[in-house]
Amino acid sequence: MDVTIHSSFLPHTDPEASLAFYRDLLGFEVRQNVKYGDMQWITIGPPNQPDTAIVLQPVAAYPGLTDDERRAINEMMAKGTYAAVNLATKDLDALFAKLRDGGAEVVQEPVDQPYGIRDCSFRDPAGNLLRIQELR
């Protein structure tokens, strides 16, 4: 059986801020940008990985959520405790500097972890945690 990861979903609260972060700072390409009423789904991904994507979706798009649940999700997103993604790069220091200098919220500067990786972390404009590890 041949199974691949096609796309993962992260919530967003501001499509323009998300585009500025993922497209302009991280260098991801926009593959789809779908609007439906006042909601917007943005499919992004690394240019060198055309078969792997992240879909940024509005919190309001989750069907069946109550107002209290939606409010709880928004609160967790604001604290950075709702959603996360792990990324990797060969030049962690350069990417860290680019994101930091571009105004991204730094959570952790590059550090050698006791479990064998070197990584850093940021929050995207919606509060999602991005851990970025160095490929060795």
Image (cartoon, rainbow, N blue to C red):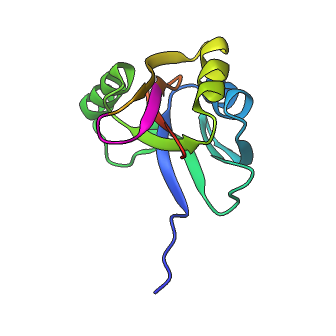
Give whichever of 7, 136 is nearer the camera: 136
Decide if residue 87 is on the left or right side of residue 64: right
Decide if residue 6 is on the left or right side of residue 112: right
Decide if residue 125 is on the left or right side of residue 25: left
Report x, y in % for residue 43. 64, 48
When the figure is inspected, residue 100 is found, relative to residue 93, above or below; the finding is above
Q: Residue at x 46, y 28 (%)?
A: 120
Residue 130 appearing in the image: no
Is 21 magenta? The answer is no
Give whichever of 76, 136 is nearer the camera: 136
**Magenta residues, start to end:** 114-121
Report x, y in % for residue 23. 71, 34
Is 115 magenta? The answer is yes
Report x, y in % for residue 68. 25, 29
| Quarter of the rendering containing residue 48 | bottom right
Q: Count the marks: how many? A: 0
Give whichever of 109, 34 is nearer the camera: 109
Report x, y in % for residue 6. 55, 63
When the figure is inspected, residue 117 is found, relative to residue 109, above or below; the finding is below
Residue 58 appearing in the image: yes
| Quarter of the rendering containing residue 117 | top left
Image quadrant in which the N terminus is located: bottom left
Q: Residue at x 32, y 31 (%)?
A: 73
When the figure is inspected, residue 103 is found, relative to residue 88, above or below; the finding is above
